[in-house]
Structures are given as C-alpha cells and as structure tokens.
C-alpha cells in the first residue's frame, strides 16, 4: 500500500462521521431539585443573596494532577460541595437525559450511560477553572455531564477544545443548561463576570460494548481491498534496502485513553473511534487480519512560520501501551515509521497535552514542538499475528507461546519460526529504551521466557536463534530456573559455549561493556544457580576476567579525585565478585585464589583505593560469608600497605619538592618539573604568553597538586605566579593519620 492508499483508508474510515468532543443537550425548563446539607433546597433561579449564603457553606475546590489532588486557585478557583453533602432529584428525567447524552456523543444504541454524581460547584465573580482534562475516576468512565442551573450571571462559559475547534456553552437564567463531553476533552470555565455560576457535575459510566455496532457493507468492502493491497505490495524503504511487504499498519484514533481503559478493550472506545474501529475490525477479519487496541504518543516538530503557516519538520509516533491477547496491558515502546501510519484526523487538529517553543537555531527558524496522546488500532495479517503481538506485548505473548508448547500445540512452533526474523529488533528495542530512559527494560524477564521456550523446542537451531540476541547481563536471579532447565536439556558443552558467547563483546548492546549493576547483583544470581557448580564457576571466571583488565590502568594513573572515585567503584564490584565466590560454595575457589594472588602481587600503595572500598562494602556481611569469600586475605594485604603508609617517614620541614606525574615533555613542562622538584623553591614568577599559561594551568589542575597558579596582569607577557602551599605537608600528615585510623577499623571489623 502506498502512502496514497493509507490516506484513502483514513478518508474512508472518516466517512461522514465528524469527531465530536462535546455536545449541548436540549435545555429543560423543569430543573432538578437540589438540596444541600446544612443549607436546604436551592430555589432557582438562584438570587445573589442565596448564592452568597451558599458559598459560605462551601469548600475550596481541588483538582487532580496525575495521582495527586491539589489546591491551587491559579488553576481552579471555585467553591465545591462533595456528593455526600448534596441530594439531587431529577423527577424521573435522568434516564432520558442520559440517552440524549449517548446519542450526542455518538455512542452506539446498544450502550447506555450511567450517571454518578460528583459535586456541586459555585463560581463567584472572577472565579474560573483553567484548561484541563477530567480524571477518569472509574474504569467505566468515558465522559462528564455538566448541568448549569438557572442563575442570573454573565461569563463563566464552558469552553471545550476539540478537533472540531472550540465549542462554547453559556448558562441561562431561565432554563437548565446541560453539556456532555468526553473525559479526555480539554476544557475550561472562563471567569465569571457578574452573578454566580452554579453547576452539577456527573461522571458518565459506559455500560455495554461500543464494539458491537453494525457497519455499512460498502465501507467494509473498500477497507478490505485497501488492507489486502497494503499487505501484498512490496515497498522499498525510504533510505534504501530491499523492497518488502509491510507487516503492520497503525490507525490513530481521535480520542486519548488511559492504560486502564485498554483492559476493557474495544468496548471502551468513544464516539467516532468506536464507529471507525467497527469498520476496520470487520474489514480486517475479512482480509485475514487482526486488530489490537493500543495507545500512542505523538511528537511533532514544526516550523513556526509567519501567519500560522507551520510546516512539519519531524514527527515521531511511539506505541506506549498495547492490549495483549490475555487482556493485560504491556508497555512495548514501539517506534512507528511514517509508512506504517494513517489517521483520519491529523494530530495538529487535536489538542496537544504539552508544547514547547524554540527560538532561532541557525539551520531552522523558530520551531514549535507539540506532544499528543492518542488511541491507536494496530492491524496485521493473521499469519504475522504472533510476531507483531510479541512486538507489542512481548512478555505476555511469550508466556502464551510457552503454554501452547507445553500443550503440544504445533502451531506455536510455526509462530515462533515467524517471529525469528524480527526477534533481534524486539530485544534490542527494549534494551535501547532502557539505555535512553533509564527505565526498567523488561529484557531480563524476556530472557527468562526465551530460555524457557528454547528448552521446550525440539528444534535446537530455532531455540539458539531465540537466545542469540541476549547478553549475560540480561540474566537475572529470576531467570535462574529457566537457565537451569535449559542447561539440563542441552548439556554442559552447549551451556559453556552459550554462556561464553553471552559474555562476548559481540553480545553487547552498548559500548560500556558488562553492566556494573549486574555485577553488583552477582551474589544473588550465584546463589540461585548454586545447584550447578559448573555454571557458577564459569560465571565467576568470566566476571573476574572482565573486571581484572580494568584495574592496572587505574592503579597506575595519577591519584586524582576522579581516579580514586573510579577505583572505589571497582572496589565495590570486586566485593560483589568475592561475595559471589562465597555463594558458589566451593565451586569458584580458583577465582578466589586468583584474586588474592593478583592483589598480593600488585601490592602498590594505590591498591588501597581499591581494597578499602571493597572491604567497606563487605563489612556488614555474615562471618561465614566473609570466611568463604577470601576477603580476610585481602584485608591482610590492605593492612600491610596501611602499616607501610602509617610508618613512612614524615616530610622534612624544608622539603618543598613535588613530583609532577609523567605527561608532556615540552620546554615549558620541563621548566615546571624543575621548579616543582626543587626542595628549596616555593614561588616562581614566570612571564609567559597566554597559550603557555593555559597549558600549565591544565597540567597543574589535572594532577591536583598543592600549587596555586595565578596570572598577574602586568607587563607583556603577563606573569604566571606559581606558589607551593602548606597543604603539601598537611596532606602528608593526613595520609599517615588516616592510615592509622583504617588499621584500627580493619582490626575491629575483620579480626575481632
């Protein structure tokens, strides 16, 4: 299907239906009887004196923001009476009103609306409610009914901002005014100019299924033709590559929905969304496709041109939530291409939930970014259903496939075979999302499910393909049982080769190497795998092989704050490896011996910056774990080094010599080395050009030496004044004092 075909599908689904966010219901001369606790019945139209007495009984109205309920009169300024304080008698009219609201909101005949009273609101002069969306306070809530009671007033209009543009609804002195609006519609109450605005609000709950409506045959037949064309026509990628037939299409709905609304499925769709979904679902069924309900986030960047003429610079559409076959809601984070997208209503015509304006940026003029929440329908051929469902809801679909394999359902094997071409992309997209956002990626759970599937597959090649995209740091303690089952099925040789592959650089999804968070959790993983000593031994050998090469360069580097901080981090990782050795219960004794031997051979003063953080990290461990870990041996190495430091001779009071770490050997640095090494020289006044001064500033700051360097801006060139500070002696004394303190702490913690 070409872009024109997608546009045609969107136009077809739009048909003659107009998206409607709100509608006025017929006015009624007979008003409901409203009784307020502690006040009595409201006599309508409400006089100014009555309104003032009523306000005295009210409370400041809160508003919802996410999961919070806030009070802020810059957002909502009105008086509020909760449902428990108000009784409303509609004199038998409410059912008719609700049916009028259903028709006005374009909900099918087979559905009905149920009203849940929310509150009575009274607005005085100057009071208002800024633009907002109503919180869906119940899983079945789809809309709000606003009932404005008769009252002499001006201003206070309800303005609903929908795709059809803003709709304004004013109250009346003579009749009750009623407006039904979808809960996701952005709306506001303008400031009251005179008098009082008195309104009742109801949550409208949907009963019945909006997906059950009948649809016209012509539209369905045309949509079927377009879908068949889409999924059988090979399309060449925009940026090169082989032409391929599409695997899915996403149709963006007009309304936004909450993740919990997805649980209710198609039956929770609103207005024109329900009508369009009915056509698309029927056409998809005839074309051998299935439809999945999802949520999409749309981000558009436009050139903020003159006269409102905005041209699209870039757009990004991400499927944030999708409903799995079992009714659960997954968060796949699927990024869609423009070739996979269509919509009857462009996002620009909808109300953005956030926007940001950017001034002139060189290559672009002024730009404006807008973000939208939209419902979406994902459509794909049935034979690609499993692969696409895994993209949308990987964890749930893999668990379903595992159950089918256990029940000897041969179609599960065929589905997995169809999944394999896109499987690496599914895994990498979850991993990339984790790297970019810092959110949990779900890859470790996916890894566990993939291992469980592989152990149930008779085709080992297919099972290996499922496991290929993963790396060792995707293995969590929760996945240990799956690995144990797989190791029992495939045998020791296969297991060793596979784990080695998972540790290899080729398995990494980033340039950072092994995840340090994974190493920190290594003791827990080792404990979970303890019944297989060959696995724990291999894990720890590979982990030490990853950690060890990072140590020499840091130990040899100049002892700056940055280097010491990095060594402290590596020390904590070393403690994790040794803790895992203890959990291996003898299976990794060779790793423990190698670590102890390496540290004993290294035995440089800088090794303390590695060992002390390692010992601190393990200080609260149980004695049995410490004994098995080998850390007492490392504590002895640290004690020997600390004794050497504590017993070192103090610096002579007239020795001002300072060692500059090796680096640049230019003439300037040679002179700097000479000044620093001179035990009698304390100050050097050095006329030097700007470039030379900057170079020396960099050398001194980088080495964190106790030398001030100030430019005296006199003469030409300016004079760089270098002055050695007393911290040279103070730091020497601190090193010995701190070494003595650490010796006492180690003796108390590790030998007591």
Image (cartoon, rainbow, N blue to C red):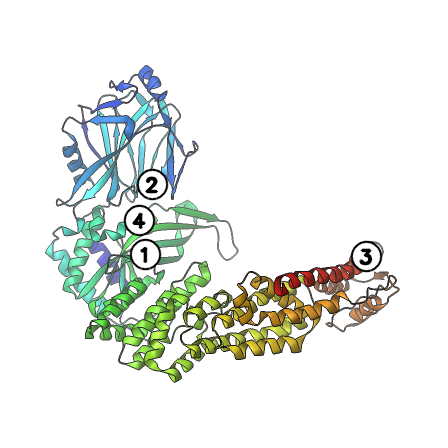
Q: Going 31% across and 16% down the picture, which residue do you hit?
A: 50
Residue reaching furthest to the front: 752
- Quarter of the image with the C terminus is bottom right
* Residue at which label 1 appears: 321
* Residue at which label 3 appears: 726
Kindly indicate the quadrant of the structure image that contains residue 321: bottom left
Q: Relative to the observer, which residue lies in front, 667 or 96? A: 96
Q: Going 30% across and 81% down the picture, which residue do you hit?
A: 460
In front: mark 3 or mark 1?
Answer: 3
Residue 222's spot in the image, x, y percent? 15, 60
| 491 left or right of 410 in image | right
Q: Count residues near mark 2 (Cα–Cα under 10 Å), then give few for <14, some for 14-19, many for 20+.
A: some
- Residue 133's disc is 2
Q: Going 47% across and 73% down the picture, which residue do you hit?
A: 584
Q: Is residue 300 above or below residue 51?
A: below
Q: Relative to the observer, which residue lies in front, 672 or 116? A: 116
Q: CA distance from mark 3 to mark 1?
A: 62 Å
| 550 left or right of 16 in image | right
* Residue at which label 4 appears: 258
3 and 1 marks in contact (CB < 8 Å): no
In front: mark 1 or mark 2?
Answer: 1
Earlier in the chain: of badge 1 and badge 2, it is 2
Q: Is residue 462 above or below residue 69?
A: below
């Amino acid at each position: 299907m070409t872009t024109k075909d997608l546009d045609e599908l969107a136009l077809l689904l739009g048909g003659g239906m107009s998206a409607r966010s709100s509608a006025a219901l017929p006015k009624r001369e007979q008003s409901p009887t409203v009784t307020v606790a502690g006040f009595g019945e409201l006599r309508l139209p409400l006089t100014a004196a009555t309104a003032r007495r009523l306000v005295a009984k009210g409370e400041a109205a809160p508003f919802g923001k996410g999961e919070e309920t806030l009070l802020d009169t810059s957002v909502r300024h009105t008086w509020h009476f909760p449902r428990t304080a108000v009784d409303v008698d509609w004199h038998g009219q409410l059912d008719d009103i609700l049916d009028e609201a259903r028709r006005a909101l374009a909900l099918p005949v087979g559905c009905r609306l149920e009203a849940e009273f929310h509150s009575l609101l009274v607005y005085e002069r100057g009071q208002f409610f800024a633009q907002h969306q109503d919180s869906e306070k119940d899983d079945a809530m789809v809309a709000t009914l606003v009932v404005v009671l008769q009252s002499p007033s001006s201003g206070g209009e309800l303005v609903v901002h929908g795709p059809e543009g803003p709709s304004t609804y004013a109250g009346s002195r003579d009749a009750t005014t009623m407006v039904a609006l979808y809960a996701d519609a952005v709306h506001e109450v303008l400031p009251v100019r005179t008098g009082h605005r008195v309104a009742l609000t109801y949550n409208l709950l949907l009963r019945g299924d909006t997906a059950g409506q009948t649809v016209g045959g012509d539209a369905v037949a045309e949509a079927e033709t377009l879908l068949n064309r889409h999924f059988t026509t090979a399309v060449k990628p925009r940026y090169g590559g082989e032409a391929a037939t599409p695997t899915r299409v996403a149709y963006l709905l007009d309304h936004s929905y909450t993740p919990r609304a997805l649980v209710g499925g198609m039956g929770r769709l609103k207005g024109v969304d329900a009508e369009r979904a009915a056509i698309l679902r029927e056409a998809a069924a005839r074309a051998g496709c299935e439809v999945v309900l999802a949520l999409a986030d749309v981000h558009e960047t436009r050139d903020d041109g003159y006269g409102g003429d905005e041209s699209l610079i870039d757009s990004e559409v991400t499927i944030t939530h999708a409903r799995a076959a079992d009714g659960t809601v997954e968060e796949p984070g699927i990024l869609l291409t423009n070739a996979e997208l269509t919509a009857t209503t462009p996002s620009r015509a909808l109300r953005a939930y956030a926007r940001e304006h950017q001034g002139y940026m060189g290559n672009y003029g002024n730009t404006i970014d807008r973000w939208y929440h939209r419902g979406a329908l994902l459509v794909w051929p049935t034979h690609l259903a499993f692969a696409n469902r895994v993209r949308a809801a990987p964890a749930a679909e893999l668990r379903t496939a595992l159950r089918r394999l256990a029940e000897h359902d041969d179609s599960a094997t065929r589905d997995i075979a169809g999944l394999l071409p896109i499987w690496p992309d599914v895994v990498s997209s979850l991993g990339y999302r984790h790297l970019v956002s810092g959110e949990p990626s779900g890859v470790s759970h996916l890894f566990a499910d993939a291992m469980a599937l592989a152990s149930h597959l008779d085709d080992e090649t297919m099972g290996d393909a499922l496991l290929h995209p993963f790396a060792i740091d995707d293995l969590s303690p929760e996945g240990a049982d799956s690995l144990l089952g797989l190791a029992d099925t495939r045998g020791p040789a296969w297991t060793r080769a596979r784990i080695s592959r998972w540790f290899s650089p080729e398995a990494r999804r980033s340039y950072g190497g092994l995840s340090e968070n994974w190493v920190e959790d290594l003791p827990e993983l080792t404990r979970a795998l303890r019944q297989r000593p060959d696995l724990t031994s291999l894990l720890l050998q590979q982990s030490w092989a990853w950690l060890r090469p990072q140590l020499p360069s840091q130990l040899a580097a100049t002892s700056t704050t940055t280097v010491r901080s990095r060594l402290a981090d590596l020390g904590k990782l070393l403690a994790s490896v040794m803790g895992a050795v203890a959990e291996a219960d003898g299976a990794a004794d060779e790793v423990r011996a190698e670590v102890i031997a390496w540290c004993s051979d290294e035995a440089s003063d800088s090794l303390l910056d590695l060992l002390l953080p390692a010992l601190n990290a393990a200080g609260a461990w149980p004695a049995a774990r410490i004994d098995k870990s080998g850390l007492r041996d490392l504590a002895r190495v640290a004690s020997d080094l600390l004794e050497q430091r504590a017993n070192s001779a103090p610096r002579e009071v007239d020795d001002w010599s300072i060692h500059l770490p090796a680096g640049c050997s230019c003439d300037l640095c040679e002179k700097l080395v000479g000044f620093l090494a001179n035990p009698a020289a304390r100050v050097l006044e050095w006329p030097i050009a700007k470039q030379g001064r900057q170079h020396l500033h960099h050398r001194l700051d980088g080495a964190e030496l106790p030398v001030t360097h100030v430019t005296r801006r006199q003469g030409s060139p300016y004079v760089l004044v270098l002055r050695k500070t007393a911290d040279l002696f103070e730091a020497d004394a601190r090193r010995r004092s701190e070494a003595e303190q650490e010796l006492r702490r180690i003796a108390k913690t590790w030998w007591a």
